[in-house]
Amino acid sequence: MLDRLADHPSVHRVATGRVTPRMGAGRPVALISKVRPVASGLSITINVDGAIIDAYVITDQPAEVVAFMDEQGWTR
């Protein structure tokens, strides 16, 4: 998923941040649970088996990237 996101023409770079073990038995609602605008583009929270990953999407076209993530079904 991160490779596909990084290959999008509006994305300059994807950088992973903190990785936190996932607690509890609940299933995540979506692969990407949070999308927040930041000065450099977007801050996203990714839910995978056993972990929550914070990542940063460096872009000057955040709306295009958010639309792409929605089209892929990665967000709710």
Image (spheres, rainbow, N blue to C red):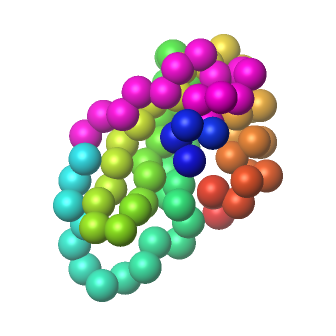
Q: Is residue 36 visible?
A: no
Q: Kindly indicate the quadrant of the structure image that contains residue 62.
A: top right
Image coordinates for residue 52, horizontal then vertical, percent: 32, 56
- Seen in the picture, residue 55 relative to 40 is either above or below; the reply is below
Image coordinates for residue 13, horizontal then vertical, percent: 52, 20
The residue nearer to you, when weighing 33 against 51, is 51
Q: Is residue 41 left or right of residue 25?
A: right
Residue sitting at the far bottom: 25
Residue occupying image coordinates x 74% and y 22%:
9
- Seen in the picture, residue 69 relative to 57 is either above or below; the reply is below
Residue occupying image coordinates x 79% and y 52%:
71
Q: Which residues are magenta?
A: 5-18
The residue nearer to you, when weighing 36 against 4, is 4
Q: Kindly indicate the quadrant of the structure image that contains residue 75.
A: bottom right
Image coordinates for residue 55, horizontal then vertical, percent: 41, 37
Indicate whether residue 7 is drawn in magenta.
yes
Report the number of discs: 0
